[in-house]
Amino acid sequence: MLSRLSLSLLIVPLVCYGGECYGWQREALDWGLIGVMGAGGYAFGKTEPFFDKPLIDGPGDKPYLEERVSDSWVYASMFATIGLAALLPNQDGWLNNTSYRHLKGAMQAATAGYLIKEFTKDIVGRPRPDYYDRAERGIEVDKGRESWPSGHATHFATGAAYLSLYVWDEWRSDDALAIAAKSTITALLTAGAGWVCWTRVADNRHYPGDVIAGSILGAGTALLAYSYQQWWTAPADADAPEQSFNFQATPVSIGVRVRF
């Protein structure tokens, strides 16, 4: 089973939906970043705070409450963002090179936010609002000093920002109905992320400053990853119409574009 998974991970970076790959160097860089940031976030998530004294303190005097949005919802939002970025239609259609770029972009945004927020939690070591109550009850004590920034806010803001950028950048129709649809999608994504932030404060998991910091981090990583894949380093011919299976005057063979 492990060998099959490893083989899949080696093959996936080499497969491009539109047949316009970047070359192995770029693929190695993109997927290497995803792997390193994901592994780094996981490693820092298992470590204790670096300092005994918090860099940002908090009273920690609130009661421990059941949370309305569990960690499983965070993971679901990350996978949903990645899946939608790869599967939603874009200017060139469905499941093409643009889809492939956004698959990587959404994964880079998610793993970058994961790494930064876990590393920052270990540096800051802020007690959660329910720190003392959870310590007395012996409930998730190891998570008691992971208040700043909010991981839930980070990942839900990443999803809302990345998908909002996608629909406005890729669905460029000026039709009133299209604008209304894009505005509605953005509003729903923003409202969902905002509701999650509210629950984190109401459930005594975070202070308002924690969710604000997490939201800024999530939106920032989404913007950087989206810009990297879509605008800064996209192939020069990414937006050109596909010419596969067409004989042209330029030196093109069937299904393969050859440059001299």
Image: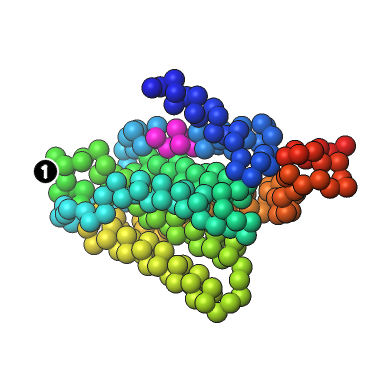
Prevalent SS, magenta region: helix
Q: What range is drawn magenta here? A: 37-42
Instruction: Give the percent coordinates (x, y) of residue 166.
Output: 55, 59
216 over 116 or under it: above or below: below
Instruction: Give the percent coordinates (x, y) of residue 217.
Output: 47, 53
47 over 184 or under it: above or below: above
| Number of marks in picture | 1
Residue 89 seen in this snapshot: yes
Q: Is residue 212 magenta?
A: no
Asked whether, in this view, residue 236 is left or right of residue 163, the answer is: right
Q: Nearer the viewer, residue 20 or 61?
A: 20
Q: Nearer the viewer, residue 103 or 119?
A: 103
* Residue shown at 61% from the left, 68% from the top: 172
Figure quadrant of the C terminus: top right
* Residue shown at 84% from the left, 47% from the top: 248
* Residue shown at 62% from the left, 35% from the top: 27
Residue 218 seen in this snapshot: no
Label 1 belongs to which residue? Answer: 137
Q: Nearer the viewer, residue 143 or 98?
A: 98
- Disc 1 marks a residue whose amino acid type is Arg
